[in-house]
Amino acid sequence: MIALIDCNSFYASCEQVFRPDLQGKPVVVLSNNDGCVIAANSEAKALSHIPMFEPVFKIKDQLIKNGVTFFSSNYTLYGEMSDRVMRILEEFSPLVEIYSIDESFIDLTGMQHQDLRAYGIAIKERIKRYTGLPVGVGIAPTKVLAKLANRRAKKEVGNDHVFVIDSEEKRLDTLHWAKIKDVWGIGKKHAQRIQETGRNSAFDFTQLPLSWVRKHMTVVGERTWRELQGENCLPLERAPKPKKAIGTAKSFGKKLEKLALIEEACSYYINEVSEVLRNQNCCANYLQIFLQTNYHSERDKQYHKSITVTLEVPTNNTFILNAEGKKALHKIFKPGYRYKKVGVCLSGIVPKEYVQTNLFAATDEKVGLMEAFDRINQKFGKTTLAPALMDSRQIEQWELIKNERSPRYTTQWEDLLCVV
DNA sequence: TCTGGGGTCCTAGGACCC
DNA sequence: TCTGGGGTCCTAGGACCC
C-alpha cells in the first residue's frame, strides 16, 4: 500500500500558521511580482469564487471588499515548512518519496493488515500538532489510486481528510465517484478527447480499450489506465533523480530597455543556477539564454529570442558561464524594445567526474575556487561573493515586486515571531 | 516487377505535473 | 499600469552511421 500525504492550500496555510488572527478567514497567496493568485485557502475559495491564475489587478477590488488577506509568495518560508512536514513523514515510513513542495508518497508495504485508516489519522494529527499545517491522506495500492483517495479524503464530507482504498468495492466506487479530469496524469486535452467518446468518470476511462489509450495517450496513458485497475506501474523513487535541466526566468519588476540592467539580471540568474548545478555535483554542456517582451501587451512591439551556447568543455563554473551568457545575451539583444523577462537554462547535464575534457581548450580554471566561493556564501549570506557583473546597486531597477511578503519567521533571526 | 537491414543521436512539439 | 515559475516524459522525423 502507498499513502499520499498532501498539505491543504499549502502556501496559504503556511501564512496562517504564523498569523493565528487569520484562522477561519480568507487568505490568498500571489505569484512572483504579485501578478496572479496562485493559492487560496478554503474560505477564500468559498467566496464568490476567486479564479486561480487570475491577474490580481483585475480582482483586487473584489479581494479587498471581501476582506481577503493577500500575501506575496515567500518561498523561503514555504520551503522550510515543507522540510518539517517531510521529516515527520520519515517517522511513519522508511521510504518517503518527496513529490513536490507540499506532497509525498510513503511506502506502507507490510501494513495491509493493520488499521490503515487509523494510521492515516495518526499521520494527519501529528503533522497538525507539530507544524500547525492541515493535510489530507489517501491510501491505496497504487500511486494513481492513492492520488484519487487523497482527493476523496478532502472533497467528500465525513471522511475527515483520510480515505483508504483497501477493497475492490472501494476501488470501483471511487472510480465511479471521480471525474476523468480528476485523474492524476490526465490533463485538459486528454480529458476532452475522452469525453468526446461519451465517457465521463474515471471508471468509464478504465473501460476504454487499451489500444485506444495507447494510440491517443502513448505509454504514459497506458500506465495511468493500468494503475487505476490496481496494477503497479509507477514505483516509489528511493532518491530524488538528478535534474536534467536547471533554469530560471523571472519577470522584471518593471520593463527594461537598457542592456546593462538586463545583463545584471541575467548574471544574477546564472549565479543562482550554477550553484544549484554544483550542489548536484554536475556540469552542463549547454547554456540557453532567452529574452522576451511582455506578450500580454498590445501596445508594445514584441520580440522573443533564444540562443543556445554549446560550451567548449562542460562546466559548473559561474565565471565561465557568466562570460558565455553575456556574449550570448549581446547577440540576441535588440535595442528599442521594452523587455519583460530574461531567462537562463543549463542542460546537457553530466556528473562532474564524467566530464570529457577538450584537448585544445584552455584549462586555466582555478582548482577549488568555486568550492571556496560556495562555502563563503553559505556562511556569510547568499551574494557575499558574486561576479562583478552583478552590480547590486542596481538590483532595485529590475528585481521582483513583493509588496505583501510575510516575515521569514523560521530562517531569519530578525524575523522571529514576537509574542507579547 | 523487384531497389537492404539495423541502428543511434538530436530536435521540436505536445502533453502533463506542482 | 498590472498577467508566475520550474520541471518531466514521450513521439515523430530528420540526419547520420556501418
Image: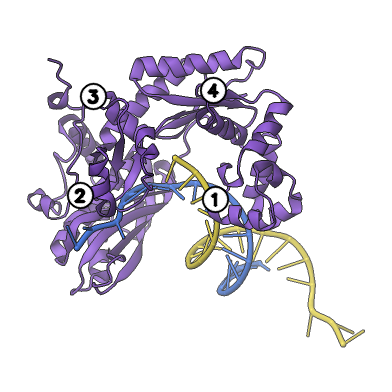
Chain colours: A purple, B yellow, C blue
Q: Amino acid at mark 4?
A: Gly
Check disc 4 and report the residue beneath it.
A158
Q: Amino acid at mark 2?
A: Leu
Q: Is residue A256 visible?
A: yes
Q: Is residue A365 visible?
A: no
On the image, which quarter does residue A307 sit in? bottom left
Tag nearer the camera, 3 or 1: 3
Q: Earlier in the sequence, mark 1 or mark 2?
A: 1
Check disc 3 and report the residue beneath it.
A21
- Measured Cα–Cα span from mark 3 to mark 1: 37 Å
Q: Amino acid at mark 3?
A: Asp
Q: Secondary structure at mark 3?
A: helix
Q: Residues within 10 Å of mark 4 (few under 14, many from 20)?
A: few
The residue that appears at 26% across and 34% down in the rendered structure is: A76
Is A237 rendered above or below residue A396? Answer: above
Q: Secondary structure at mark 4?
A: loop
